[in-house]
Image: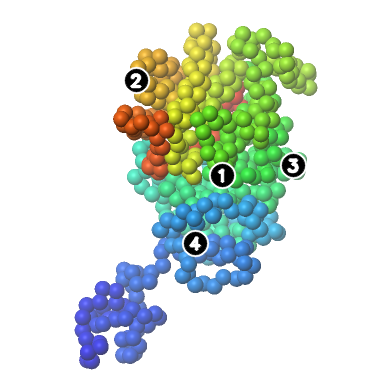
C-alpha cells in the first residue's frame, strides 16, 4: 500500500475504513479510499461525521420561510448560515429579531389560510412516525393539566381537552406538544429534566406544515403556544419569541381579534377563540414589551367582555352562574383587564429607547398612558374608603337600571382594592422589574430603592385590607388573590431585609399574607400550586435582597449612584413560568367569574 494510504486509526472515518483501520479523508458521499477500491462507503450515526443536529430539518424550514418573506426568492438547501439550535445568537441578531416590524412578520404567511375549528391531524404526516397510543395520551393529558405552570393563560378548556383525548379526536400537533411538555418538572425546584425533544420536533414539524399549506386551525395555535412555553422555560427566549411572533401574526391575519363575538360561531368556538386571542396578546406584551403594536387600542382599551360570557360559562362548565350583589359587573371586570394592558404599556415605557428611568421616573406621567390611567382611576377611586359615593363617581347600569355602587364593606369592592394595589406591587417590584428590562442591564441603586418603597406602600394597603376582612368576618377566597397577596408579602420581605432596623412591622405583613394563603389553600384544590410558586419566589428573593444590601462598600463615596448589574439574576430565575401563572390565574377563560365573584365554587373546578 502506498505511503499516502498507510494504515492508521481514523477516529472520524467511514465504517469501511474504520473497520480496516485505513486512512480516510471523510469525503461525501464516498471517501477517496472506498472510491479507489470500489467499496461501499457508509457513515454510521456514531461516527459524528457531518451529522446534522436533531433540529436541523425544523430550523431549516423556518429559515427558508423567513428568507422567502424577506427576499421573495426561494432559498437553497445550503445550511452554511444555519443556526443549529445549540449555539446562542449574537446580541445584534437577537435584538434585530425582537425589534422586527410587526407588519413584516404578517407578510410571511399565505393569505388564503383558513382558521377553522377543525383538526389539522388529517394533514400528511411526512417525517412523523410512531403516533402516541390513546393510553399514553390520556396519561400525558392528565399529567399536563395537573402541572399548574404548564397550563399558561388557560389555553385549553380542561373538560374539552380530556374528551378529545379520550375520544381520539385530539390533533397530532397538540398531542406531541403536550407529550413533550408533560415531562418537565414543576417549580419551585429548577427542572431536572428537559422536555422531550423528539416529541417537540414532531409537533413543530406539524405546525410548520399547517402554516405552509394554509390550513391553520385552533389546534395549530394551541400547539404553537405550548412549544413556545417549552423553549422559554428551557432558557431559549429567542426561539420562543419567534413562535409568539408567528402566533400574533397568524391571529391578526385570520381576523381572530375582530371576530371574537361572531354570532355564527358556537359557544365553544367563541370561548376557544377568546382564549387563544388572550394567550398570544398577553404573551406578546410580556415578551415583547418594547414593540408598539396597534392592537392595543383595538384589543386592550376598548375591549369589553362578550355579553354571552356568563352564558358560555354555564354551558361549558355546567354550573349555575350567580348574578347577585356578590358578583362584580362586567364594567368592573373590564377595568381589571385594562390593568393588565396598562402593565404591558408600562413595560413599553421602561423599554423605550433613549428613556432611561431616573430616580423620579413615574410611568403614569407618560402621555400615551394618561387617558388609560384616568379611566382606571375612575373605576377604582370612584368610592372613598368610608363607603360613601364620591361626587364624580361613575354610575353603572344594567338593563334594569341597577346601580352597582359598592361600599367598602362588600366583598367585590375589597377584592378590587386588593387587585388594584397588587398590580402596583408587581409593577414596582424590583425583582420582577429587573427581569422585564433586559436592554437595561443595570440601574442606579437609589432608583431601585425608590421603586421598592413605592411597592411597599401598596403592600401595606393590602395588609390593612386583609386585617379588615378578618375583623369583619368577610370571606373572599380566590387563588388569584392568594398570588397577589403573596407578591405583596415578598415586598415586605425585601423591605425588611434592606431596612434591617424595621423588621417587626413587615413581619406582621408577611404573617397576614400567610394566614390568608393558608385559608385559601385549604379550600381550593389548585391553590397548593400557588404556595409552591411563592416558595420558589421567596427563596429567590432571599438571595437577591442580601446581594442588594451588601452590593456596595460603605467606603464608596458614590454608593447611592452605583450601578447594579442584574444580568445574572435574570438568567438564574424561571421568570417566564411565574409571569404566565399570574395571567393564567386571572385570565383562565370562562372561569373568570370564579375569581372576580364572592361565590365559593367547588374546589375541583376552581381552575
Whether residue 487 appears in this view of the structure is no
First of labels 1, 3 by sequence position: 3
Residue 601 screen position, x and y as percent: 55, 23
Task: Determine the secondary structure under disc 2.
Answer: loop
First of labels 4, 1 by sequence position: 4
Foreground tag (2 vs 4)? 2
Residue 603 screen position, x and y as percent: 50, 26
Residue 66: image quadrant is: bottom right
Query: How far apart are the two marked residues, 1 and 3, measured between alpha carbons?
Result: 39 Å
Residue to which mark 3 is pinned: 262
Foreground tag (1 vs 2)? 1
Query: How far apart are the two marked residues, 3 and 4, measured between alpha carbons?
Result: 36 Å
First of labels 2, 3 by sequence position: 3
Residue to which mark 1 is pinned: 353
| Label 1 CA crowd tier, 10 Å (few <14, some 14–19, many 20+) | few
Tell me the residue at 32%/81% (across/down).
Answer: 25
Whether residue 96 appears in this view of the structure is yes
| Label 2 CA crowd tier, 10 Å (few <14, some 14–19, many 20+) | few
Residue to which mark 4 is pinned: 59
- Tell me if 430 is positioned left or right of 322 in this view: left
Task: Determine the secondary structure under disc 1.
Answer: loop
Foreground tag (1 vs 3)? 1
Residue 449 screen position, x and y as percent: 44, 27
Tell me the residue at 44%/45% (across/down).
Answer: 233
Tell me the residue at 63%/12% (across/down).
Answer: 384
Query: How far apart are the two marked residues, 1 and 2, measured between alpha carbons?
Result: 36 Å
Query: How far apart are the two marked residues, 2 and 3, measured between alpha carbons?
Result: 57 Å
- Comparing 373 with 488, the one in front is 373
Residue to which mark 2 is pinned: 500
Tell me if residue 100 comes above or below residue 531 in the rendering. Answer: below
Query: How far apart are the two marked residues, 4 and 1, measured between alpha carbons?
Result: 31 Å
- Tell me if 322 is positioned left or right of 150 in this view: right
Amino acid at each position: 500500500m502506498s505511503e499516502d494510504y498507510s494504515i492508521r486509526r481514523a477516529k472520524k472515518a467511514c465504517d469501511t475504513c474504520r473497520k480496516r483501520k485505513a486512512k480516510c479523508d471523510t469525503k461525501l458521499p464516498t471517501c477517496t479510499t472506498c472510491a479507489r477500491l470500489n467499496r461501499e462507503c457508509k457513515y454510521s450515526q456514531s461516527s459524528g461525521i457531518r451529522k446534522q443536529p436533531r433540529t436541523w430539518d425544523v430550523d431549516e424550514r423556518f429559515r427558508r420561510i423567513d428568507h422567502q418573506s424577506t427576499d421573495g426568492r426561494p432559498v437553497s438547501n445550503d445550511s452554511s448560515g444555519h443556526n443549529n439550535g445549540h449555539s446562542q445568537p449574537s446580541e445584534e441578531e437577537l435584538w434585530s429579531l425582537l425589534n422586527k416590524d410587526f407588519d413584516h412578520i404578517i407578510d410571511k404567511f399565505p393569505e388564503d389560510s383558513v382558521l377553522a375549528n377543525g383538526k389539522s391531524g388529517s394533514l400528511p404526516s411526512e417525517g412523523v412516525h410512531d403516533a402516541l397510543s390513546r393510553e399514553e395520551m390520556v396519561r400525558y393529558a392528565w399529567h399536563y393539566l395537573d402541572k399548574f405552570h404548564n397550563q399558561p393563560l388557560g389555553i385549553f378548556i380542561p373538560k374539552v381537552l380530556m374528551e378529545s383525548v379520550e375520544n381520539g379526536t385530539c390533533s397530532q400537533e397538540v398531542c406531541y406538544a403536550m407529550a413533550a411538555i408533560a415531562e418537565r418538572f414543576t417549580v419551585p425546584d429548577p427542572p431536572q429534566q428537559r422536555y422531550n425533544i423528539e416529541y417537540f420536533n414532531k409537533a413543530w414539524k406539524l405546525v410548520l406544515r399547517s402554516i405552509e399549506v394554509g390550513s391553520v386551525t385552533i389546534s395549530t395555535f394551541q400547539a404553537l403556544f405550548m412549544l413556545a412555553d417549552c423553549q422559554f422555560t428551557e432558557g431559549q427566549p429567542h426561539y420562543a419569541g419567534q413562535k409568539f411572533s408567528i402566533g400574533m401574526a397568524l391571529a391578526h391575519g385570520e381576523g381572530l381579534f375582530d371576530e371574537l363575538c361572531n354570532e355564527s360561531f358556537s359557544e365553544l368556538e367563541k370561548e376557544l377563540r377568546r382564549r387563544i386571542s388572550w394567550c398570544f396578546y398577553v404573551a406578546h406584551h410580556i415578551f415583547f414589551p418594547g414593540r408598539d403594536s396597534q392592537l392595543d387600542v383595538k384589543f386592550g382599551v376598548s375591549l369589553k367582555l362578550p355579553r354571552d360570557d356568563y352564558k358560555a360559562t354555564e354551558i361549558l362548565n355546567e354550573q349555575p352562574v350567580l348574578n347577585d350583589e356578590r358578583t362584580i359587573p362586567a364594567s368592573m371586570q373590564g377595568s381589571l383587564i385594562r390593568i393588565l394592558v396598562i402593565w404591558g404599556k408600562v413595560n413599553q415605557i421602561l423599554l423605550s429607547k433613549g428613556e432611561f428611568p431616573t430616580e423620579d421616573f413615574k410611568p403614569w406621567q407618560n402621555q400615551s398612558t394618561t387617558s388609560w390611567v384616568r379611566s382606571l382611576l375612575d373605576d377604582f377611586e370612584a368610592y372613598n374608603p368610608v363607603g360613601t359615593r364620591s361626587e364624580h363617581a361613575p354610575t353603572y347600569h344594567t338593563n334594569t337600571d341597577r346601580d352597582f355602587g359598592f361600599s367598602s364593606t362588600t366583598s367585590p369592592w375589597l377584592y378590587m382594592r386588593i387587585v388594584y394595589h397588587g398590580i402596583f406591587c408587581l409593577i414596582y417590584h424590583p425583582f420582577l422589574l429587573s427581569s422585564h428590562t433586559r436592554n437595561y442591564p443595570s440601574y442606579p441603586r437609589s432608583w431601585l430603592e425608590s421603586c421598592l418603597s413605592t411597592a411597599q406602600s401598596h403592600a401595606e394597603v393590602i395588609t390593612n385590607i386583609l386585617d379588615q376582612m378578618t375583623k369583619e368576618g368577610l370571606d373572599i377566597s380566590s387563588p388569584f388573590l392568594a398570588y397577589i397577596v403573596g407578591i405583596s408579602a415578598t415586598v415586605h420581605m425585601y423591605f425588611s431585609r434592606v431596612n434591617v432596623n424595621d423588621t417587626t412591622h413587615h413581619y406582621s405583613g408577611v404573617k397576614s399574607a400567610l394566614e390568608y394563603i393558608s385559608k385559601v389553600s385549604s379550600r381550593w384544590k389548585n391553590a397548593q400550586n400557588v404556595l409552591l410558586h411563592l416558595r420558589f419566589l421567596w427563596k429567590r428573593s432571599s438571595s437577591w435582597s442580601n446581594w442588594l444590601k451588601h452590593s456596595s462598600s460603605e467606603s464608596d463615596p458614590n454608593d447611592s449612584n452605583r450601578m447594579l448589574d442584574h444580568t445574572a439574576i435574570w438568567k438564574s430565575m424561571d421568570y417566564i413560568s411565574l409571569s404566565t401563572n399570574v395571567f393564567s390565574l386571572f385570565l383562565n377563560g370562562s372561569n373568570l367569574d370564579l375569581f372576580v365573584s364572592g361565590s365559593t365554587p367547588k374546589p375541583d373546578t376552581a381552575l
